[in-house]
Image (cartoon, rainbow, N blue to C red):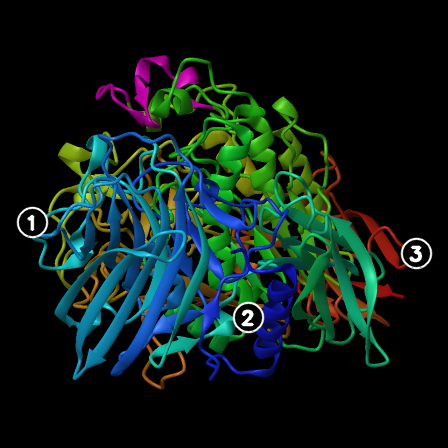
Amino acid sequence: MRVSTRYRILFIIICSFTFLCCSDKTADTSFMSSFPLSVKRSWIGPEYWANPLQDWQLNNGRVECIVSGGDRNMVLLTRQISEHDGEFNLSVDFGRIGEDIDDEKGWVGFKVGVKGEFSDYRDSAVRGTGFPIGLTNEGILFIGSIDSTTPIIEDNFDEGKLKLNGKIVNGKVHLTLKLLSKSDEIIAELSKKSIDHDWISGMIAIVCHSGEILENVEDGRSFFSQPWGYKPGTGREGNQLFWFDYLKLEGSIVESYPKHQYGPILFSQYTLSKNILKLTAQMPPVGKKDDQSVLFQIKENGDWKTFQESKIHALSRTATFRIENWKSQNDIPYRLSYKIAVDENSQKTFYREGIIRKEPWNKEEIVVAGFTGNNDLGFPNNELVDAVKYHNPDILFFSGDQIYEGVGGYGIQTNTIENITLDYLRKWYLYGWAYGDLMRDRPTIAIPDDHDVYHGNIWGAGGKATPKGKTGANAQDAGGYKYFSEWVRVVERTQTSHLPDPYDPEPVDQNIGVYYTNMNYAGVSFGIIEDRKFKSAPKVLLPKAKVHNGWAQNLGFDAAKDGDVEGAVSLGARQLKFLGDWSSDWSDNTWMKVVLSQTIFANVATLPVKKSSSDAAVPSLKIFKTGEYPPDDIPVQDMDSNGWPQTPRNRALEIIRKAFAFHLAGDQHLGSTIQYGVNDWHDAGYAFCVPAISNVWPRRWFPSEEGKNRKVDMPKYTGDFKDGFGNLMSVHAVSNPFYSGKKPSKLYDRATGYGIVRFNRKTRDIKIECWPRWVDPSKENAKQYPGWPITINQDDNYNRKIIGYLPELVIKNMTSPVVQIINQFTNEIIYTKRIAGTSFKPPVFETGNYKIKVGELDTNKEKVFVDVKIAEGNESKIKVVF
């Protein structure tokens, strides 16, 4: 008999009271599912995590597995079976919704003792393995594995109840599994004794599995075979479709963790720039009877008041708020409010709280944390998150690859716009699950890269579609985007809709949007650019190179000599114009400029000479012990890097250095700090590529020829180099992979971590830090990767050879004005900066007449001086009086 609506509502109220009043772990441990009637949606509810999201749905007051495949499971987030002696009872109703196929292998039931590799319930829910218990399609009950003596239930049994009782005494488990009919009549029963307790303690999940159970398996965690030739979890075949209801778990060793709920407001990201707040709330795939809008609320006189309402976007499931004239002088608590249906005519309100931090104008040091390569090995990255909390950065910057195709398992699904969207969202939700607490109370900048749109590499070619009929690397090499343009917009909406308004919002081809913009925060102006969207595909422009996946397969082709072809685009004209305007705009009391992008303008990577025409060997390269060095590595020519094309690369750097701008990026999986060279080494800005959070592609920089002009006692891989494309760069530090002795090696021996950059308002120094993910920075002896920290000054980012100085500017009645130097003959802006103090002697790099602008430019507080030449003596001065 179905539980009445009144009972369901009462149960929810009780659970809600428990959730609000208790700590992370509560005394009330029993659980019974309460699936709302007349509500249909892909997201089951905050107590559950479905693997994968798009293969399950809530419908008709029950949960349905609607796509057949290996290890389809739904994990209960809020309860666990403890490691103590005692008893538990677990049960669920089930029934087939697919067509009955007699010869199909499969089973339904439970996984208990679900555990992941990294001791966190989130990892367990996504990647955890467990002990299988259930009923096969052949009518065999099993516990762990099939016993040949277990009798077969003669009748084809497609609907009923599974009940599991566990008794644990002295660490050993006695399990009894019963199959009951709809009328609670016992159909069959199976018991097993002396099972190791470790197989039982942990989380529990409902399972609908298409495939066989291996016989006589000692460790039940290894129970999956490979149905139809695919690994469990990757295929979508067969007809193993079931519904589940009345999931119940109770007993003396059941533990309750109500704070482990996830959703319905999953996470949010915000930015604050020029007193405009933009915040995006990420929602799950809610149903038609759930609210279609999210409320943004702030406290006024102690009460929460709705400040703005935002409709949930139908595909991206985002709600974006844009609020002008934000009062940024104080920390302002906020909360997001949302209601989901708990039954036909009832809703429950959920909240997610945070703080919009005051803009730190009085803070001497502005701290930015940089991340890249967020694969799910190590998820949810607790050690890294805790370390970043210790640094307490003012801004978070995620430079791309916030997800990878393999995140969360089950491959990718790209056949329809809805399926690829749900497939992406499930992966994207892990990003918020890991970093949501960091993001709820500080500005976050996130920009997508190639893997975020399911590309190994991408040359966006202005947003066009890849040619029809091509797949994989062949499609990528032709330029453009492989999958639905509408879906690309979904990805960008989830990751960038909270950024300040685009500089130029005109879409590119296929109506794909743009997000390049600037964010001004506490005097630091961040120029946010898109590395890949406008970039040319090298295969199209370099036919002689025989390019495959961005690498020349013609071994006689040298991209350093022949790859810099006319017509090749890197950032594109629109972004170069943006950078030009941004570099000369120092309004809003800007005192520091920083470029943020996916990757740096150099190819800091080497490979053994015999393997240098492709990066396919990278994952299998030997990880060296400290002090070891490969014998024959050479710089490579990977056209996915921003080392190609060279002339557009140099043009971008010439513009960026006019703002004395520092460059922060990621993508390369290899932490590095370099200084760019355009016409000579050291004549352009510094760049920091942060290490990957989780590194499946451990690139390295081990050139066999040592760097020129390297500092005493520095490694041979530092100094002045040309990268594989002939670009000038000076390498100061690299976090090469090395053997750490920590487990798992695949996480810790691949130079994983994050970056911290500190911008000092008073000295204009820039301190660059590169941290391993396993180091606790709060410890007195905490060490960064070798070569860091590195401290430079803002002025080091424009280091052309100086041939003279214009007369010294002596300013009265204004402190720290903006100074702009213009070539009066060409009208070219040479550089713009906000000086520190009241005097400045402007350096120049060639003779001629110059125009000098001083003050707050383009306002009535601007002074202009013309026909200014290089001063012949030290006494020459220009008095600037305001």
Residue 860's disc is 3
Foreground residue, 366 or 823? 366
Badge 3 vs badge 2, beta-carbon distance below 8 Å? no
Q: Earlier in the sequence, mark 1 or mark 2?
A: 1
What's drawn in magenta, residue-wise?
Answer: 537-557
Q: Which residue is mark 1?
A: 148
Q: Which residue is mark 2?
A: 393
Quote the CA–CA distance across marks 3 and 1.
91 Å
Q: To which quarter of the image does residue 751 belong?
A: bottom left
Q: Residue at x 51, y 27 (%)?
A: 416
Q: Is residue 682 magenta?
A: no
Q: Amino acid at mark 2?
A: Pro
Foreground residue, 479 or 385? 385
Q: Nearer the viewer, mark 3 or mark 2?
A: 2
* Residue 546 higher or lower than 146, as above or below: above
Quote the CA–CA distance across marks 3 and 2.
36 Å
Q: Earlier in the sequence, mark 3 or mark 1?
A: 1
Answer left or right for 313 relative to 421. right
Q: Residue at x 55, y 62 (%)?
A: 396
- Crowd band around label 2 with a 10 angstrom C-alpha radius: few (<14), some (14–19), many (20+): many
Query: Which quadrant, please, contains the C terminus?
Result: bottom right
Q: Position of residue 306 (x, y in %)?
A: 82, 64
Which secondary structure, mark 2? loop
Q: Amino acid at mark 1?
A: Ser
Q: Is residue 551 magenta?
A: yes
